[in-house]
Image: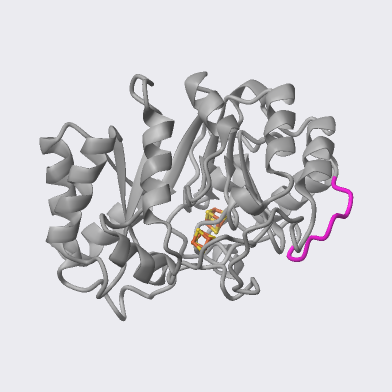
Amino acid sequence: MSQKLYFCDELNKTLTCMHDGIFPCCSGHESPDYYKKYNGQKINKKFLMERKLEIFEKFTEEKIKDSKCFGCYFLRERRPEDVISDKYNMLHISNWTHCNCGCIYCARMKDSTGKIITKKQKSEYYDMLPLLKQLYKEDVFERENLTVCIQGGDISVLKEFEPIMKELSKQGVKTINVLSNNIVYHSIVRKLLEKRKISFMTSLDCASRELYYKLKRVDKFDDCVNNLRKYVKNIEHPPVVVKYIVVEHINDNILEIHKFVDLMKDIGVENIEFMIDNKWALFTNLEETPFPSHYWDLYLFLKKECEKNNINFMIWDKLENDLNKVFNS
Ligand code: SF4
Ligand code: SF4
């Protein structure tokens, strides 16, 4: 009898350029790596493919326990139609940690200086633009089918942000997901939203200045709301997503969610994503310490509020799966 084989779509088609290294994924599970530490060395297609095959090598029933991927939500049984590809259709750009705010839930605090900075700077780790050009030259992307996701610290303080956007537009992509704290307005973002070349995602997490300050440690609530209004104005079904990240003892209540949905409706935002602080969503062993018991109600409440107001409700499938596992099994 042939043995069971495993597969991961992230490993097969995603390249994740984090500030400290290059990985197949950013799943929250301890990931295998292309480069555990990356600081600008030359990369070629052959190297990426060899490393990918090396990781897939352990995706057998016999060896899977020795793989870092063991236990990951995204690991699944291999199907006959699964083919290991030498190209990527998803690129995460996340090569810096500088930021102009200081969210209390920021997963990067351990790697950044933690300082709130407002001037554009180079990444403290490595430059993305030369790497991006090299990756295109090596022909590692399914160009017309490539989704790029850019987030790090914040785009407002990354010197390379506009050059990266220009390079991507020149080389060709399917779409770009730009994630930002939205404290600073970018005309290039508005232009690309109008052309429907990008989607824009931010997290506001509340509906008041006071709570915003507690969560982000900067007094920029009004700027964020005004910028959102400018991004969605006169765009039909604007591709803008606003997250509500639930943080224990701060915004984990129905009243705030209700006010938040009202605010989104007033601004004209048509997509809301429910999220939970990474402390819970990524870094807690839920079997030992499950989510606080009211989180299920918050999830259901936001979902229903969205339905009632004709707003598209979104959630990361892994988080939805974890919620169901904790509360419905
Ligand atoms: S199985 Fe999980 S940890 Fe491994 S590459 Fe896929 S997403 Fe990443
Ligand atoms: S905006 Fe993002 S990078 Fe900046 S502090 Fe908040 S979570 Fe961290």
Residue drawn at the location 79% of the way across and 57% of the way down? 126
Q: Could you tell me residue 218's position as x and y percent?
A: 45, 65
Q: Quadrant of residue 86?
A: top right
Left or right for 234, reference 156: left
Q: Is residue 41 a member of the stretch shown in magenta? A: yes
Where 250 falls versus 243 (above or below)? below
Ligand 1: give its quadrant. Answer: bottom right
Q: Quadrant of residue 299?
A: bottom left
Where 251 falls versus 48 (above or below)? below
Q: Could you tell me residue 236's position as x and y percent?
A: 34, 19
Residue drawn at the location 73% of the way across and 48% of the way down? 159
Where 190 falls versus 161 (above or below)? above
Taking depth in this image into account, of 47 and 99 the one nearest to the observer is 99
Residue drawn at the location 20% of the way across and 65% of the way down? 295
Q: Could you tell me residue 291's position as x and y percent?
A: 25, 71
Q: Could you tell me residue 303's position as x and y percent?
A: 18, 46
Q: Main secondary structure of the magenta part?
A: loop
Q: Is residue 312 visible?
A: no
Left or right for 165, reference 59: right
Residue at the bottom extreme, as displayed: 288
Q: Which residues are magenta?
A: 36-43
Where 127 falls versus 130 (above or below)? below
Q: Is residue 156 visible?
A: yes
Quadrant of the image for the C terminus? Answer: bottom left
Left or right for 321, reference 80: left
Residue at the right extreme, as displayed: 42
